[in-house]
Amino acid sequence: EDQVTQSPEALRLQEGESSSLNCSYTVSGLRGLFWYRQDPGKGPEFLFTLYSAGEEKEKERLKATLTKKESFLHITAPKPEDSATYLCAVINAGNNRKLIWGLGTSLAVNP
Amino acid sequence: SAVISQKPSRDICQRGTSLTIQCQVDSQVTMMFWYRQQPGQSLTLIATANQGSEATYESGFVIDKFPISRPNLTFSTLTVSNMSPEDSSIYLCSAGGLNEKLFFGSGTQLSVL
């Protein structure tokens, strides 16, 4: 069964303290892996799409990487405004358009 | 990118009543979806809204309970019918194109008493 597991469930960092969020997946052929950010009271906001092992994408303090089993979202020198829930989702090669979502990692960055 | 307007943003409803949620996209999109987001659970796809035809429902969701309309490429509605407290949740409209990147509305926070 296709599955996405995110860890940790919650993470608290001090401003400037870099860390990584993990997204492990089990799918029968990966078509794409997506990272989203969700702020309280809002819908998810698209961050990155990764398609193949070894691929990396960057945006400001965030960098997403992909292997054949997992993806990492690296946060470098985070700021309080990076506080949010980060969601990971995958689409397998045989089931287009239906994203399989993880439960998310709730990140809090203290000033 | 697409901007999605969803309304109402929140509502408190009585058991047995129905609520219709509207979703307006600022550009024509290929795909529109309705999701449910409950505390402690991952986003759950309710259905794919098909333009001009019946929606495609996921397992566990039926048309009588969640009728969906999509009269054109930029607008869709989801109705939550005969509500019970178990329907209390956040309902999200999303839209995307052929690259599978989805954009989301801000959601409707529904509480059923």
Image: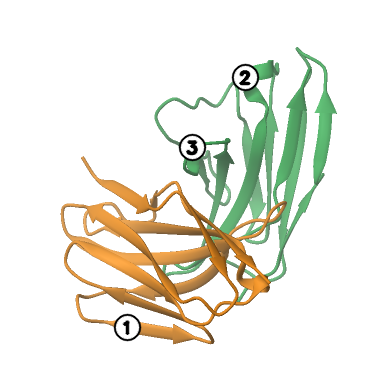
Chain colours: A orange, B green
Residue drawn at point x = 53 percent, y = 69 percent: A46
Q: What distance separates the C-alpha of mark 2 from that of mark 1?
A: 41 Å
Q: Position of residue B97 (x, y in %)?
A: 49, 68
Badge 2 element: helix
Decide: few, some or many residues near mark 3? Use Cα within 10 Å; few <14, some 14-19, many ≥20: few
Labels 2, 1: front one: 1
Residue ID for mark 2: B86
Does the rendering let one see residue B103? Answer: no
Badge 3 element: loop
Q: Looking at the image, do the residues carrying marks 2 and 1 touch, with CB atoms under 8 Å apart?
A: no
Q: Position of residue A21 (x, y in %)?
A: 39, 64
Q: What distance separates the C-alpha of mark 3 from that of mark 2?
A: 14 Å
Amino acid tagged 2:
Glu
Specify the subunit that label 1 lies on.
A
Badge 1 element: strand
Decide: few, some or many residues near mark 2? Use Cα within 10 Å; few <14, some 14-19, many ≥20: few
Decide: few, some or many residues near mark 1? Use Cα within 10 Å; few <14, some 14-19, many ≥20: some
